[in-house]
Image (cartoon, helix red, strand yellow):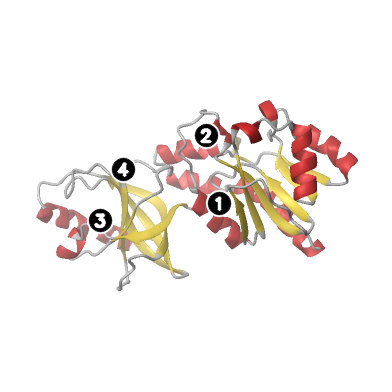
Amino acid sequence: MEIISRTTDFYLEKDTAAAIGKFDGVHIGHRRLLEEVLRCKKEGLKACVFTFDPPPSVFFGQTDGRELTSGEEKRLLFERMGVDILIEFPLTPETAAIPPEEFVSRILVEQMNVRLIVAGRDLSFGAKGAGNAALLQKMGSELDFRVKIIEKVCIEGQEVSSTLIRQQVEEGNLTLAKQFLGMPFFIAGKVVRGNQIGRTIGFPTVNLMPDAGKLLPPAGVYFSEVRVRDKIYRSITNVGCKPTVTDAGIATVETYLYDFSGDLYGEDIEVYLHEFHRPEQRFESLEHLKHQLETDIRAGAERK
């Protein structure tokens, strides 16, 4: 997958089908957009995703900046789905002030050679967010590109949105979040060296330092799975600050893998959180911690 990032100076030679949006979480609603552009590969168009960096909600100070999916996680998902080109368009005071008509004619048509634009009904772009689906459709007929507007996906009467999913993750409702995401909530990154306490008590683990902007569920222990070298392992994961062994107060993601042995330091892995098991807690001693880990691991092994 070609990635165009941190520049407005680019030109795509081949005709494209482009999905435009924020794509936080790459949830089932986003996937409807992506399915449309991916189908166009059969017509000889390049499947393109256009998103903003940082997201408009972050740039304009409307959120605290924490996202369901980090930039690297989005890249991973887009590439895995078959996207050809990802444009992470830099959002700056200058680019935010581009009139919407100019944004369409210069960026989308001249620089990206769009033949199809796919977006959600709530799309906004250009200066003061004045660009919308209606403007796209009007300019499409003038500049010879098609527009497909995708309606919101609803599950049990609820519109699927990144905001709704963030709420579920923050409350620890990962089963419901999975339903809206279309996959388990996950954390990706490189394995780093921890304090290696697990090894001393017979439970070696792998540690991730989540991206600073990554939204995390409540501190606690979760039944999970880990993707390592394209293989899936059952696991159990602690999200939190490990108060029994450190007072640093830094959130980490520490995982015990069933049926795995080996060194993963420096390797890229993905930790998929399925279900909350218990809150994180401070134990009186490493012996008490070991006893609880034995109980947790047994519970995870018995889970279907």
For label 4, the residue is: 219
Q: Is residue 129 left or right of residue 69?
A: right
Sequence-earlier tag: 3 or 4: 4
SS for callout 3:
helix
Residue type, label 4: Ala
Judge the density around disc 3: few (<14), some (14-19), many (≥20) Cα neighbours within 10 Å. Answer: some
Residue type, label 3: Asp
User: Mark 2 or mark 4, which is nearer to you?
Assistant: 2
User: Mark 4 or mark 1, which is nearer to you?
Assistant: 4
For label 2, the residue is: 58
- Give percent across and percent down for residue 19: 70, 48
Label 3, label 4: how many angstroms apart (C-alpha)? 15 Å
Residue type, label 1: Gly
Judge the density around disc 1: few (<14), some (14-19), many (≥20) Cα neighbours within 10 Å. Answer: some
Residue type, label 2: Val
Label 1, label 2: how many angstroms apart (C-alpha)? 25 Å
Label 3, label 2: how many angstroms apart (C-alpha)? 38 Å
Sequence-earlier tag: 3 or 2: 2
SS for callout 2:
helix
For label 1, the residue is: 182
SS for callout 1:
loop
In terms of depth relative to the viewer, which is nearer, 63 or 155?
Answer: 63
